[in-house]
Image (spheres, helix red, strand yellow):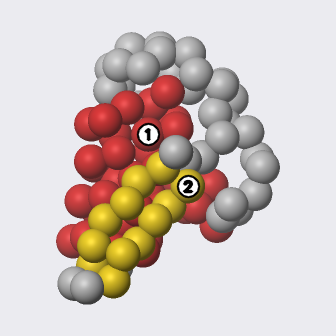
Amino acid sequence: QGVLCLDGDTPLHQKAAPVTILDRIGAGDALAAGVIDGWLAGNMRAALQYGTVMAALALSQAGDSVITTREEVERLVEAGDSSQLIHR
């Protein structure tokens, strides 16, 4: 369904990115990595976007490592809530 958090008193929700699931291993870790990256940059909205994209990329790959680049993640984040299916 996505991810939900509170930024102070403001609830934030980010839908899950559409993905063809190949392997579930590492998706939670990838979500956490994306959220931490955005949080450290001081932007919780971006944190949720990065987290959901990173989780989708993890789900689309076999194994527990996410093979991607910052450019790919940013391109998918910029695509927003489009129906662009993440498939590898």
Is 23 placed above or below 43 here? Answer: above
Is 84 placed above or below 80 here? Answer: above
Residue on which disc 1 sits: 55
Question: The C terminus appears in which quarter of the rendering?
Answer: top right
Residue 80 bears which disc, if any? none
* Labels 2 and 1: the sequence-earlier one: 2
**Residue 54: x, y in percent?**
44, 45
Which residue corresponds to the image point at 37% horizontal and 60% vertical from the top-left? 4
| Amino acid at pointer 1 | Ala
Task: Identify which residue, 47 or 7, lies in the foreground.
Answer: 7
Distance from label 2 to label 1 (Cα)?
12 Å
Which residue corresponds to the image point at 58% horizontal and 22% vertical from the top-left? 21
- Would residue 67 be visible to someone looking at this image? no
Which residue corresponds to the image point at 62% horizontal and 55% vertical from the top-left? 76
**Residue 7: x, y in percent?**
27, 79
- Would residue 56 be visible to someone looking at this image? yes
**Residue 62: x, y in percent?**
47, 14
| Amino acid at pointer 2 | Lys
Residue 15 bears which disc, if any? 2
